[in-house]
Image (spheres, rainbow, N blue to C red):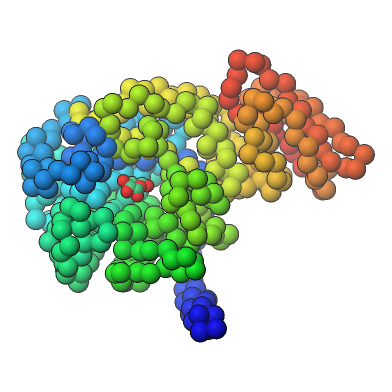
């Protein structure tokens, strides 16, 4: 009984907070623009690239922190070329890049003045990685966004949670000081490089999802202040906190799950927002975001295309990650995969960019997106060549998007539409049929 009252009071408080916050016009327009982009490339890069064991190596490898950090004096990625990264991303058909400005290890990729010197300017490289990337993105018309880790494995003022304490010991920290530092850095990032969004990660180390569905929080991050600070600079907020979206968060993130799924265990209890843009992030290498030298398993191009289409059919963007190596290059295999994805996107992109969920439900082998009076059927799985679905609207025409040739449409007696595709046996990619709907 008591619990019910508390829950009701909490729901009320949440409802009134949501009411109190009304996104400004610039914000709503930026959300739409973000949702229209539908495909982005995530980049995880930092000192850990030199260790070539993934971005959690300091913690998972149980390294001595100070020894790990000395890699700063040996970080000199001689092959780093922002224009080449941008070329690969753009050629893949992606519309934006989200890069780790600072990951959990606390190392910053730009010449920040807010920290104690643990940043790119104290490496032999001494170049502003984010600045160079930002310039190239501007030239190419790509949006740049910044991942920013809330969790920190470096600073003495960070209040260590479940994970960080394995690196820092159970230090209490000084959150007021840490927050001041974060705001100074975020201010620099926004003022210098004008990102579309700040993408937070790591809140989860202070949160526990209880059996009754409630969340226990060991640290009050004072997100209201942080989000207001970012919004005042006309930048969107995203938080990979594995929780339902909260007021003032503009984009709901799903880590390695399509919205509504929980295959990874990260999305438990995460209901799907029906008003905010959604973004699903995933990895091109198996189970790792930062570069791992022993990694042989990469996703295939048809797999990435299927993920893009399935995400779009659920109103979500796909943010596909690449981890460049210590020389500053994308793994060759990732470049090859992305080039093939780009070929598909150039022919079929119209069924992805600027679309929303198609509304007709067809399962996961065949999915749908829509834009204006067009409904796009994506025949993703080569084993499924016939889509049967109820639809009230008249189907004025149907064609294959790739060839422009007419596609076969029938109606059953009960009024269901039946769309059948012919598939060349060798083609494993999503085949898109465009239906123009009448009244
Ligand atoms: C997880 C990991 C992190 C990665 C992120 C990307 O939260 O901690 O390494 O950056 O997922 O979604």
Nearer the observer, 362 or 95:
362
Quadrant holding the N terminus: bottom right
Q: Quadrant of residue 400?
A: top right
Q: Is residue 356 above or below residue 173?
A: above
Q: Position of residue 326 (x, y in %)?
A: 20, 31
Nearer the observer, 291 or 132:
291
Q: Position of residue 398 (x, y in %)?
A: 76, 32
Nearer the observer, 1 or 134:
1
| Residue at 44% across, 36% down | 94
Does any portion of residue 102 appear in the rendered image?
Answer: no
Nearer the observer, 113 or 156:
156
| Residue at 20% across, 65% down | 159
| Residue at 43% across, 51% down | 266
Q: Where is residue 346 in the image (x, y as percent from the top left)?
A: 53, 28
| Residue at 20% across, 53% down | 166
Q: In which quarter of the image is residue 324?
A: top left
Q: In this view, does 30 lie above or below 125?
A: below
308 sits to left or right of 170: right
Q: Position of residue 127 (x, y in %)?
A: 15, 39
């Amino acid at each position: 009984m008591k619990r019910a009252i508390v829950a009701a009071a909490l729901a009320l408080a949440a409802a009134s907070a949501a009411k109190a916050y009304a996104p400004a016009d610039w914000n709503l327009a930026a959300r739409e623009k973000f949702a229209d982009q539908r495909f982005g490339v995530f980049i995880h890069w930092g000192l850990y690239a030199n260790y070539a064991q993934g971005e959690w190596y300091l913690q998972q490898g149980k390294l001595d922190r100070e020894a790990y950090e000395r890699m700063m004096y040996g970080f000199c990625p001689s092959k780093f070329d922002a224009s080449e990264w941008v070329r690969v991303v753009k050629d893949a058909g992606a519309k934006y890049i989200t890069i780790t400005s600072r990951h959990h290890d606390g190392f910053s990729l730009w010449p920040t003045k807010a920290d104690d010197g643990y940043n790119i300017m104290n490496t032999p490289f001494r170049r502003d990685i984010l600045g160079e990337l930002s310039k190239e993105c501007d030239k190419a018309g790509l949006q740049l966004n910044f991942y920013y880790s809330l969790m920190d494995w470096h600073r003495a003022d960070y209040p260590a949670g479940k994970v960080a304490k394995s690196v820092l010991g159970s230090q209490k920290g000084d959150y007021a000081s840490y927050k001041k530092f974060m705001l100074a850095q975020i201010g620099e990032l926004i003022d210098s490089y004008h990102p579309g969004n700040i993408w937070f990660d790591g809140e989860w180390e202070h949160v526990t999802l209880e059996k009754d569905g409630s969340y226990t929080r060991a640290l009050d991050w004072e997100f209201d202040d942080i989000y207001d600070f970012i919004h005042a600079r006309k930048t969107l907020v995203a938080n990979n906190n594995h929780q339902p979206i909260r007021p003032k968060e503009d984009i709901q993130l799903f880590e390695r799950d399509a919205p509504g799924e929980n295959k990874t265990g990260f999305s438990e209890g995460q209901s799907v927002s029906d008003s905010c843009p959604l973004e699903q992030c995933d990895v091109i290498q198996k189970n790792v975001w930062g570069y791992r030298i022993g990694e042989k398993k990469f996703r295939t191009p048809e797999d990435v295309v299927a993920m893009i289409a399935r995400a779009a059919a659920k109103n979500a963007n796909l943010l596909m990650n690449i981890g460049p190596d210590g020389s500053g290059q994308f793994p060759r295999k990732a470049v090859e995969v992305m080039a093939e994805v780009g070929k598909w996107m150039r022919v079929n992109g119209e069924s992805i960019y600027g679309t929303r969920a198609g509304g007709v439900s067809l399962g996961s082998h065949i999915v749908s997106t829509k834009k204006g009076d067009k409904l796009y059927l994506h025949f993703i799985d080569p084993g499924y060549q016939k889509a049967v679905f109820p639809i009230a609207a008249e189907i004025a025409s149907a064609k294959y998007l790739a060839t422009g040739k007419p596609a076969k449409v029938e109606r059953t007696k009960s009024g269901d539409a039946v769309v059948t595709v012919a598939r060349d046996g060798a083609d494993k990619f999503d085949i898109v049929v465009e239906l123009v709907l009448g009244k």
